Amino acid sequence: MLLGKRVVVVLPAYNAERTLEQTVRQIPEGIADAILLVDDHSSDETVRVARALGVRTFVHPRNRGYGGNQKTCYREALRLGADIVVMLHPDYQYEPKLLPAMASMIASEVYDVVLGSRILGRTAREGGMPLYKYVSNRALTAFQNLLLGSKLSEFHTGYRAFSRKVLETLPLLANSDDFVFDNQILAQAVAFDFRIGEISCPTKYFPDASSINFARSVRYGLGVLATSLEYRAWRHGLMPAPRFGKAPDLTVVHLPADPASAVRE
């Protein structure tokens, strides 16, 4: 518990066997009331390692994509009674020791969403981020800030913390099951006027750290542009957009269990 709030750390995993243990062991002791790993049908020993570490594990019997993985992460975290949910990639690219700081920014009720930014503090390139990724990150973020009216240093980090209210309010089912989910959820947070804070986070790029290839990066970038333009059109009343409209009755917290789609432990 943190200031009376239950903290659940979620790990969206796909072939994270080599880095999972190091990531989990670096999570500060006592910060997480529960650690939940959702395995997206990995072909390696991710599930075995997670269970050996005593991590609560949820297994997709088929690959649902990065966005689909996150949807399960948040649904299951809310079912565990989470007041604060922190998403940490199990590839040890982001610094687990920042978890208490990020969770505290929400527990104090100053922010609703907190991002671990690789751009603040100029650690991205020092940590090995490829130049083309850095340049595209900065360009896409600038474009989104312009269209969304926000002032974030980065829209593309995978290290995030959310309050329960955010996850219960946003219509996450309207979002993609692919990588652009990350971008869509932040655009939704802006649309719903949630308070977004950032903290500088050093990052590490190394062979075992997960990273999408150039072709998928281009696909992601196009999805980011489409999301931003969709938001702008919705904001000016030029087109309906369920993604940014009033949240439907069926939100993440109310998703029915699908006994044919998962295995819990």
Image (cartoon, rainbow, N blue to C red):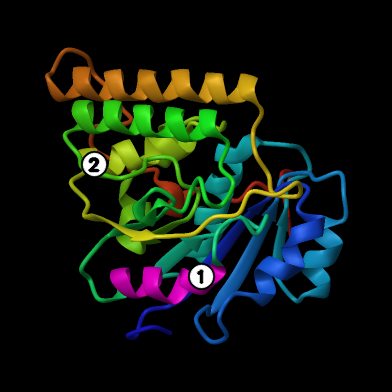
Residue 211 is drawn in which quadrant? top right
Which residue occupies 55% across, 47% down? Answer: 70
Q: Are marks 2 and 1 in contact (CB under 8 Å)?
A: no
**N-term mark: 2 or 1:** 1
Along the horizontal axis of the image, is 28 left or right of 44? left
Which residue occupies 35% across, 53% down? Answer: 120
Query: What is the magenta range?
Result: 96-106
Q: Given the image, on which type of amino acid does mark 2 rest?
A: Val
Residue 95 picture location, percent across and down: 54, 65
Circle 1 crowding by C-alpha within 10 Å: few under 14, some 14–19, many from 20? many
Task: Answer whether residue 81 is visible to the viewer in this image.
Answer: no
Overall secondary structure of the magenta section: helix
Which residue does the numbered mark 2 point to in the structure image?
Answer: 190
Residue 93 picture location, percent across and down: 61, 55
Which labelled disc corresponds to residue 8?
1
Task: Answer whether residue 176 is visible to the viewer in this image.
Answer: yes
Which residue occupies 50% across, 55% down? Answer: 74
From what the image shows, is residue 89 above or below residue 215? Answer: below
Q: Given the image, on which type of amino acid does mark 1 rest?
A: Val
- Check disc 2 and report its element: helix, strand or loop: helix
Which labelled disc corresponds to residue 51?
none
Quarter of the figure with the N terminus = bottom left
Q: Nearer the viewer, mark 2 or mark 1?
A: 2
Question: Which residue occupies the extreme front position in the image?
Answer: 126
From what the image shows, is residue 213 above or below residue 238? Answer: below
From what the image shows, is residue 49 above or below residue 256? Answer: below
Residue 68 is drawn in which quadrant? top right
- Check disc 1 and report its element: helix, strand or loop: strand
From what the image shows, is residue 104 above or below residue 231? Answer: below
143 or 229: which is nearer to us? 143
Which residue occupies 45% across, 18% down? Answer: 222
